Amino acid sequence: MADQPQPDASSLSALIQSRWSCREYRPDPVPREAIEKMLDAARWAPSACNRQPWRFSVVTREETRKAIASRGLLPGLSAQWVVGAPVMIVMGMCRAVVTHRVAPWLSGVDYAWIDLGIAGEHLVLQAMELGLGTCWIGWIRPAVIRKIVGWPVSIRPAILFAVGWPEEPSPVKRTDRLPLSDLVQWME
Ligand SMILES: Cc1cc2nc3c(=O)[nH]c(=O)nc-3n(C[C@H](O)[C@H](O)[C@H](O)COP(=O)(O)O)c2cc1C
C-alpha cells in the first residue's frame, strides 16, 4: 500500500472532498488487510436499534467477478469496467422483523436502507484514505447476485462496490453538486 498515491487524508473534509467514483482500475491485487480495514469501517456505522443489517461478500476470484459482471448487472451498465476492478464487494441487507419490517410500516422510514447507506459510505471513505478507488453500483440484479455469492433468501444483495487501485489518481473532471442554497432551509 505504501507505494500507492495517497490523497490528503489529514482531515475528514479533505477525504470527503476528494472521493469520486472510480471506473478504471489497475489490475494489481488489493491487500486483504486493506479490505478488512474497509469492512471494519463499515461495521462501525450507526444503525437503527443497532441491528447492523449489513452483510458482505468479498469477491476477488476472477471467475466469480466475471459472473457478477456478465449476469448480475442490469442492461446499460458496462460490465467491462466493472470486471476490471480486482475486488468486488457485495453489500447485502438482512432485515430484522421489528426494526426493519414492523417499525418502517409504522413510521414510513425504511431504516435498513439508511443503515446500509451509512455503512457503505464508511467503507468508501476508508478506501479513499488508503488510496483505493471505489464505485457504488446499484444497477444490479439482486436475485442473480444472491445465487452467485450463495446467500440465503434472508440476505438481499443491495449494492455492489467496485474496489481497486485507480488508474488515475483523480478524475479529469469532478461531478458537480447543487448549491446549499437549493438544498437547505434555515429555520432561525
Ligand atoms: C446508491 C448508488 C448507486 C450507484 N449506482 C451506480 C451504478 O450502477 N453505476 C455507476 O456507474 N455508478 C453508480 N453510482 C455512482 C454515481 O453515479 C456517482 O456517485 C455520482 O454520479 C456522483 O459522482 P462521484 O461519485 O464521482 O462524485 C451509484 C452511486 C450511489 C450512491
Image (spheres, rainbow, N blue to C red):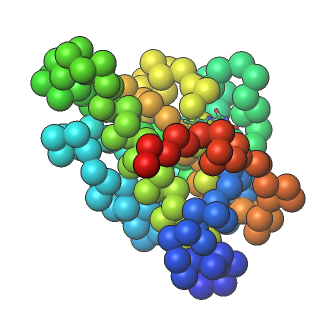
Residue 54 visible in the shown view:
yes
Judge whether 78 appears above or below 128 on screen: above
Q: What residue is drawn where x is 66% and y is 65%?
A: 18
Q: Quadrant of the N terminus?
A: bottom right
Residue 120 visible in the shown view:
no
Judge whether 104 appears above or below 164 on screen: above
Q: What residue is drawn where x is 42% and y is 70%?
A: 33
Q: Which residue is farthest top?
A: 105
Q: What residue is drawn where x is 57% and y is 25%?
A: 140
Q: Which residue is farthest right?
A: 172
Depth check, front residue: 145 or 93: 93
Q: Quadrant of ligand 1?
A: top right
Corner quadrant of residue 78: top right
- Count how many numbered circles sit on residues in the image: 0
Depth check, front residue: 91 or 86: 91
Q: What residue is drawn where x is 73% and y is 57%?
A: 25
Q: Which residue is farthest bottom?
A: 2
Corner quadrant of residue 51: top left
Measuring from the top left, give residue 181's x and y in whole percent: 65, 45
Q: Which residue is farthest front?
A: 188
Left or right: residue 67 compared with residue 106: right
